[in-house]
Image (spheres, rainbow, N blue to C red):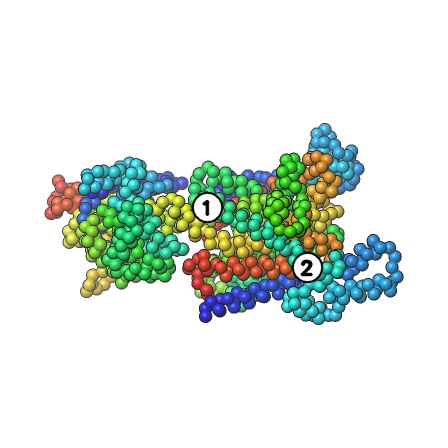
Amino acid sequence: MRFVAFLLTKLLVYVLIIVIGVTVVFLVPRLLPSGPVEALLARIMAGGGFMEPAQVESMRVSLTQTFGLEGTLWEQYRGFIERVLLAGDFGPSLAMFPTSVNVLIRQALPWTLGLLLTATIIAWILGNVIGVIAGYRKDKAFSKVLELIAVAVYPIPYYILALILIILLAYLWPVFPMSVHVRSAPLSLRFLATVVHNSFLPALSIIIVGVGWWVISMKALSSSVCEEDFVQFARLRRVSDGTIMTRYVARNAILPQITALALMIGGVFNGALITEIIFDYPGLGSLTYMAVMQSDYNLLMGTVTLSIVAVATATLVIDLLYPFFDPRIRYR
Amino acid sequence: MLRAEDVKAYYETRRGPVRALDGVSIALHENEIVGIAGESGCGKSTLVKVLYDNVASPLRLVSGRAVLTRAADDTSVLAASGSIQDRWWRDISFVPQASMSVLNPVVRIGPHFRDSADAAFRQMGRGAFWARVREVLSGLRLGDDVLSAFPHQLSGGMRQRVVIALATFLDPRFILADEPTTALDVVTQKEILTLLVDVQRRMKNSLVIVSHDMAVHYQVTGRLAIMYAGKLVECGPTSGIFREPRHPYTRLLIGALPRIGQRGKLSGISGVPPSLLSPPAGCRFAGRCPNVMDRCRSEEPAVRSVGNRHVVACHLHEPVAEDDS
Amino acid sequence: MRGLRLRDAGVELRIGVALLLAIIILGLVVPAFAPEDPRRWNTVPRNLAPGGDYLLGTTSQGQDVFWLLALSVRNSLWVGFTVGVIATLFGAVVGMAAGYVGGLPDRVLTLLTDSFIVIPALPILILFSALLEGRASLLLVGCVLAVFNWPRPARQTRALVLSLREREFMRTAWFAGSNTLQIIRREIAPYLTGWFIANFVYTVLIAIATETGLAVIGLSNLQDTTLGGMIYWALRHQAILAERWYWIGPPTLVIIVLSVALFVVSSGLSKLSARRRGL
């Protein structure tokens, strides 16, 4: 019963967060002075020469309709929620008419998920392992060097780091391609190898920044766990060093890192967007960028809404799994 | 036998060394319960640290030594050479202050036993090892089910009994208990003390109880050492000390205990202990002593025997001046 | 502020502060001495390597890299500062209110904060910039960035206020009859000063990093140059392929040093204030 109550509260918050997020996305373009319709019209007129005022007007009306921009704000909002959130239909893409936004997203999603999940998980594990060792042996020289490297690398803006990686590993010492050259193909070992080879640099950039952060935070967490009574008592009991580090320090210090992972997912998604743009990686980020560049309003709403749902879901899943890691927390 | 010989141990701080132990000697024999008493900051916990060879920065052993002698094979090991540490948990073990957090909150109780005794586990084998753990637990009136419980699922008293089981299941010759009952309520305190005494009687080993609470010492200990400001001021059989305390400080400590049928105010001890950064010359208790004499402020009293294994460090008990006994 | 003295600071923090000061001087003082507007094209010969009359060389548009760099630093700092001030103040007010008042207002504010954390800021920023077509003033870019950067300070402030609220002196103040506003002002705010500054510096870091990201893909203000914008133009004119490292190198290096310095200062300050307060 308590589990049901816990689950219901979490789900309620989850739905609310998505609704609030989507509402912000809905409002932003409508509050700006130049809306997507005008932007698109301006683009068409700049590229396509002369049009009759009446033609322009009818185009404006049809575009307004396609974008779901007719009627009062409230009517638009209701239509938007019904169509997007309840039916999951984002309408046709404008840049790639008549392909639907849903199809485009379905093609791009596996790429982004594959890259993000792999890179995030590798970074999280690697960073926390290094962080625990550095925190447990915080007086050793290698711990200080490791932290110094992490502090020097983590704050570098994502883009700059990716740029340096490209210059180093694709230009000066060209072991990896500058941008991703694979598009969908039937699944085979060779195809997979190409994907991995092509995704290596983008993944590496995500991992480097991620590892930096996890090392810094895990080091701080584990060195404070080392001061706890139960670690001191374990030491006095002659519990072996390895056991203290894993079962006593790491096992306790990892708990806040699980929560932090949930909070970081939003940021990781932002980072992935830039990564994909830089490396021309065929995922949601590039799709979003293309949508922006082509004023493809439906596509943009689709990708942004999807990322909000994805981030909220990942957060929810980690929240629900947390009690399995911390025996003190039972479903409340 | 576990001996501290003229131990000086200082805490290094930015303002200079804090002389937590300033020339303390004490010997603990097999099969006895010894109490160490005194106000907080008198050095009693530091003494336990030195005896257990748990000396780490900022604490520094300046001079003196601690020696552990095993009666069975008459081997000695020295503390501060790190060699007592090899005996941790087999020959000498430790019961920390009762608190929420001495047990790993995310690990069940069972693995705590396993973690503490890798060598013993291999030596005894799985079956014998857990049989021994269960035996010790049932001696402490704990069921097998605690092994699969998490620390937060146990009450404070149960947790402290688990800690005692942890400290005793390898049958060590010496058990050092630092304020083992302080954080517990009165009823649980009594229960834990009784269990500790039971365990000692059965194992015939030696138990050291550090406590600021003179009532605890009266109930449990056979021999009592009283410390003040980094010095040992009196040491002897508990019954003798309570019957006839020699040092004025001991007298005041015992006088501060409530008695059945007592009326009126309890007497406290006025004043505060001296700073251990720059302790005064002479007797350190001189500033608060009701019997203070001129020489107390300049000349440090030596530890002298007053008969019946009873020693005291006080100018009132100069053998030449007068003999109280 | 009285609680924070550089005297107690570690080596890392001192180095961070020194680097930061150097960059601030580069950004705030140096541009005033520029012989002419560094953004203008063809004021100097093109594609000169560093040395001689031009300390860091010249761009292929005929701009002096050194003066352009100084101006870019100023604009990047300005964006960071704007975002830092707005986001930290707003976040702190929300966090304090939520943490101190508690109950329903806390739940609503926390829900709002959590929602904003989940919204991926970058696509929306890109949408903004695209609709404004690179004409947004740096102030506007700063304001938009601030909208997505208040939740973090808000969360932290709330957590801190919650932990402070449980302390003895808070109850004493309450029993002594102080009202909510007085308690926040007199008892909570002074404790949080160190955290505010640390948070502010961190937000400046995030803002500068985000603006750089936007600028590098050509979506920030492109008329006023920032560090990211400078990299954008360098890339647009094939500085990598032409191996004009003196053009793309300096802004990249400055942004790295600036970010690391900001991070070190922020974490150093929060460690310092945590130690002083025993939090």
**Residue A273 in view in this figure:** no
Image coordinates for residue A223, horizontal then vertical, percent = 44, 46
Instruction: Determine whether A120 is above or below C247 in the image.
Output: below
Quadrant in the rendering for residue C45: top right
Residue found at x 52% / y 65%: A10
- Who is closer to the viewer here, C37 or A98? A98
> At x 35% / y 46%, what residue is drawn?
A239
- Sort mark 2 into few (<14), some (14-19) or many (20+) by Cα contacts within 10 Å: few
Give the residue drawn at x 67%, y 42%: A178
Please give the residue where the numbered disc 1 appears in the rendered image: A132
Horizontally, residue A311 falls left or right of residue C168, namely right
Nearest-to-viewer mark from 2 and 1 = 2
Q: Which residue is mark 2?
A: A103
Residue at left 46%, top 46%? A132
x and y, in percent, of residue C248 in the image: 69, 38
Which element carries disc 1, helix, strand or loop?
helix
Q: CA distance from mark 2 to mark 1?
A: 44 Å
SS label for mark 2: helix
